[in-house]
Image: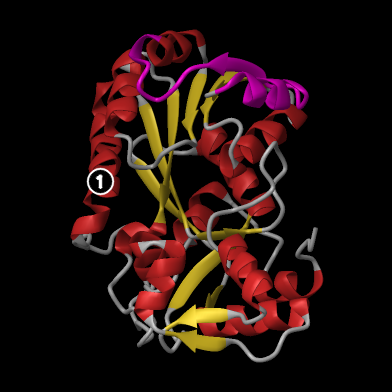
Amino acid sequence: MNVFITGASGFIGGSVAVRFIAEGYRVRGLVRSAEQAERVAALGITPVLGTLDDAGILAREAKLADAVINAASSDHLFAVQTLLDALAGSDKAFIHTSGSSVIGDDARGEWASEQIFDERTPYTPVPEKAARAAPDKLILDVAGRGVRSIILCNSMIYGNGLGASMHSVQIPPLVAQARRSGVVRFVGKGVNIWSNVHIEDVTELYLLALRHGSAGAMYFVENGEASYAQIGAAIARRLGLGEAQSWPLQDAINEWGFGHAVYSFGSNSRVSAARARNELRWQPRHASVLEWLENDMRLD
């Protein structure tokens, strides 16, 4: 089977591509530069130079492929629309990578939410996440147009990448700040909670979704949860630093930017992957981000 993957040089897309190649799939991957093309080619991915704004390239690759996985931007409505239009009427699979910050709140680290979302839970995204919700709705609605469209809504992903990019988007910035300053920091009180999942378990779910996922289905992706105070404490132990400390929101914004500080690090995002376990028989193997941080996180 031929699979076209956007974001093939990235953390998620590259890891999924490498896992698929190991299963015997032929993978073509969208990359933005010759340097990225060289890196993914070394992993067995056939590089396709282009961007999410190149409608002709996206449409061509979607029509050539037996399945398409969008693992680049979760918010790029034009790219999603272009790929779906090219796939319409083909009954091919389209798997879109979303993120659970779409149901994130504005806790700013000050409180832990008791709300755990599943795929049936109604929600209204905060204005800053409206761009993520729009492609999700489009993908779910297109199932009636002859596309087996599926959304995997990942929570915080941890672990070492399997492809050209080793690092995810949440834990590495916390570690980098701690190593520069000598102090691990979390936003506000750090009591806000995020569901999390290991990258190797994520790639297994992409395989299962391609093989067995239902048209118009959305699956949350998680296998555990932790507060940012707990995550900070585990990072501090791994780095041999003192106790993790609270950081005023504005200082966090100055370091990471508003979006990261408020929504990646300051919000609650608690979800349940019961549907993925029940429908797709997904059985994740990695159960604790805190254990990984203390024992397996690379320090190079």
In reply to whether residue 46 is colored magenta, the answer given is yes
Left or right: 236 as drawn, with respect to 248: right
Q: Is residue 288 above or below residue 127?
A: below
Q: Which residues are magenta?
A: 33-56
Q: Disc 1 marks which amino acid?
A: Ala
At horizontal 50% and vertical 53% (from top left) the residue drawn is: 276
Q: Is residue 253 above or below residue 209?
A: below
In reply to whether residue 239 is colored magenta, the answer given is no
Place of residue 193 in the rendered image (x, y in percent of width and height, measured from the top left):
45, 78
Report the quarter where the C terminus lies.
bottom right
In the rendered image, which residue does mark 1 sit on?
131
Left or right: 132 as drawn, with respect to 200: left
Q: Nearer the viewer, residue 77 or 165?
A: 165
At horizontal 48% and vertical 17% (from top left) the residue drawn is: 50
Q: Is residue 40 above or below residue 257?
A: above
Q: Nearer the viewer, residue 70 or 248?
A: 248
At horizontal 60% and vertical 50% (from top left) the residue drawn is: 202
